């Protein structure tokens, strides 16, 4: 927030100062932040899912892939620096995404003097609750995931030399509560993606009834595929397919 001079004011011999909002804090700026951070997070989710699925190629292949990730950027960067830069960017992106969405929702509520009709209100409140609580669950999951399968502090094995074994130990049947939390977080991400993808498709011009149906279908398919791609790994460990 900064001050600007309003020279159009009717006062004579006085300069009137008015408050103007920083571009990035405007509604347009916050929506741009949401769009950019959303793209970053979606691209990461797709690439991370593809990497997770390499566990079905065997222990040697998966461990080789995990070790390769730690060496990205070397010798320009020290080992694992790229991963920590990536993690920092992701946490900042999640925080910026949640903050922008929260501020926009609060402004929209404050600017709406007349309540929506009953059906519209139910739909809007459901979407708002899903996105709001979904963002919190996702943030907690990201933090837990880093401490679990990245740093190994919360992993029962925590062996950086054996990423495959860490995944198997993490989703072992006796640790069903970890799998349950993982499923909850991933399903929440799926709902979040469906809503976000639908909004993005609508913004790209799918405004007609037929276009809206296409947007809903595309968003649902995308969310289901990504959710299934993540859930197949813990269930494969749980059922003994990966051991």
Image (cartoon, rainbow, N blue to C red):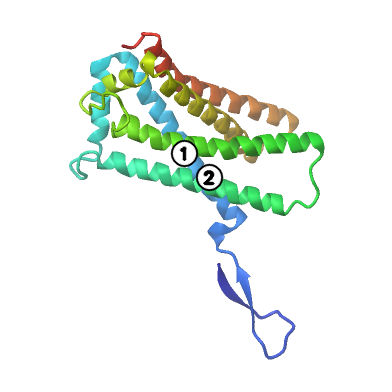
What number of labels is visible? 2
Residue 190 at x, y percent in the picture: 54, 28
**Label 2's element?**
helix
Circle 1 sits on which residue? 139
Picture residue at 50% right of the left edge, 23% below the top: 227
Residue 189 at x, y percent in the picture: 52, 31
- Screen quadrant of the C terminus: top left
Is residue 212 shown left or right of residue 100? right
Residue 75 at x, y percent in the picture: 17, 42
User: In this orientation, which residue lies closer to the viewer: 91 or 170?
Assistant: 170
Task: Please rate how many residues cluster around mark 2, counting C-alpha atoms within 10 Å: few if below 14, some from 14 to 19, many from 20.
Answer: many
Residue 207 visible to the viewer: no
Picture residue at 32% right of the left edge, 44% below the top: 85
Which mark is on residue 98? 2
User: Contact (CB < 8 A) between labels 2 and 1?
Assistant: yes
Quadrant assignment, res 224: top right
Q: Is residue 205 above or below residue 214?
A: below
Picture residue at 79% right of the left edge, 33% below the top: 119
Furthest toward the top, the residue is 240
Picture residue at 19% right of the left edge, 43% below the top: 78
Is residue 60 shown left or right of residue 205? left
User: In this orientation, which residue lies closer to the viewer: 204 or 40?
Assistant: 40
Which mark is on residue 114? none
Residue 167 visible to the viewer: yes
For the residues labelled 2 and 1, the Cα–Cα distance comes to 9 Å
**Label 1's element?**
helix
- Screen quadrant of the N terminus: bottom right
User: In this orientation, which residue lies closer to the viewer: 184 or 3?
Assistant: 184
Task: Please rate how many residues cluster around mark 1, counting C-alpha atoms within 10 Å: few if below 14, some from 14 to 19, many from 20.
Answer: some
**Which of the two discs, 2 and 1, labels the residue nearer the N terminus?**
2
Residue 114 at x, y percent in the picture: 81, 49
């Amino acid at each position: 927030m900064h001050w600007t001079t309003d020279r159009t004011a009717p006062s004579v011999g006085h300069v009137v100062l008015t408050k103007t909002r920083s571009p990035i804090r405007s509604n347009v700026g916050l929506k741009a932040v949401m769009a950019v951070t959303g793209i970053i997070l979606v691209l990461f989710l797709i690439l991370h899912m593809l990497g997770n699925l390499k566990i079905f190629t065997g222990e040697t292949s998966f461990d080789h892939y995990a070790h390769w990730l730690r060496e990205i950027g070397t010798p320009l960067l020290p080992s694992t620096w790229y991963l920590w830069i990536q993690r920092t960017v992701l946490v900042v992106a999640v925080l910026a995404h949640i903050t922008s969405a929260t501020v926009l929702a609060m402004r929209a509520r404050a600017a709406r003097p007349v309540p929506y009709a009953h059906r519209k209100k139910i739909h809007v409140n459901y979407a708002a609750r899903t996105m709001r609580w979904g963002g919190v669950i996702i943030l907690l999951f990201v933090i837990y995931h880093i401490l679990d399968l990245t740093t190994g502090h919360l992993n029962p094995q925590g062996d950086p030399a054996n990423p495959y074994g860490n995944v198997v130990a993490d989703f072992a049947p006796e640790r069903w509560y970890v799998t349950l939390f993982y499923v909850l977080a991933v399903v929440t991400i799926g709902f979040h993606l469906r809503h976000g993808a639908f909004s993005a498709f609508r913004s790209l011009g799918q405004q007609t009834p037929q276009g809206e149906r296409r947007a809903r279908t595309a968003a649902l398919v995308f969310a289901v595929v990504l959710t299934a791609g993540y859930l197949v790994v813990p269930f494969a460990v749980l059922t003994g397919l990966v051991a």
